[in-house]
Amino acid sequence: MIFNNKRSIQDVVLFHVVILLLALISCLDLTVLAETNFQLVNDWPDLNVSSLKFYGSAVAIYPRSQLLVVLHRSDSWEEAGHNLISHDTVIVLDRSSGKILSTWGKDQFVKPHGIEITPGGDLFVTDLKLHQVFKVC
């Protein structure tokens, strides 16, 4: 096959990548997901979480542990302004019981948006208003 321009080479490469992905997807056993019967756990999280008036927007799970980290955003974009949030924005829960283990993040974020934990246990938080990614130790 002879190509006269870069665009056609890119198109052919993209076409082959799409075909490869479709072939891989066709090999997946999606019936496992269809057969899963999820049920709401009524007494999770612990009642003391609701007393925080905490609205979770992102969740991260520490690898190989029972720790679940939930990120709270400010209530609205306009409300966030450019001031640091004056209450804790992150809660750490026990995954099985839903009990609060710790809270933190007061006066650290303006509009926290995402949270991620690496396989090594490093925690990163993004802030939309500050346009930053924070590594938290």
Image (cartoon, rainbow, N blue to C red):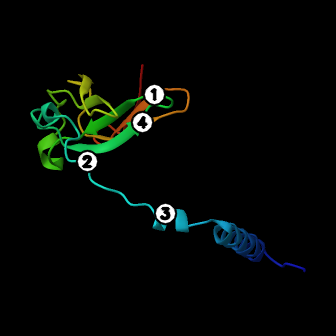
Residue 32 picture location, percent across and down? 53, 63
Give me the disc on residue 65. 1
Q: Quadrant of residue 105?
A: top left
Q: Are marks 1 and 3 in contact (CB under 8 Å)?
A: no
Amino acid type of the residue that numbered disc 1 sits on in the rendered structure: Ser
Question: What residue would you read off at disc 2?
Answer: 41
- 28 relative to 73, above or below: below
Q: Quick one: label 3, few (<14), some, or many (20+) residues within 10 Å?
A: few
Pick the front one: 105 or 65: 65
Relative side of 63 to 45, left or right: right
Give me the disc on residue 107. none
Question: What residue would you read off at disc 3?
Answer: 33
Dot 1: element: loop
Q: How far apart are the alpha carbons under marks 1 and 2?
A: 20 Å
Amino acid type of the residue that numbered disc 4 sits on in the rendered structure: Ile
Label 1 or label 3, whichever comes before in sequence order: 3
Label 3 or label 4, whichever comes before in sequence order: 3
Residue 64 picture location, percent across and down? 51, 29
Q: Which circle, 1 or 2, is nearer the viewer?
A: 2
Amino acid type of the residue that numbered disc 2 sits on in the rendered structure: Val
Amino acid type of the residue that numbered disc 3 sits on in the rendered structure: Leu
- 118 relative to 7, above or below: above
Residue at position x 55%, y 32% in the image: 119
Dot 2: element: loop
Label 4 or label 2, whichever comes before in sequence order: 2
Relative side of 48 to 121, left or right: left
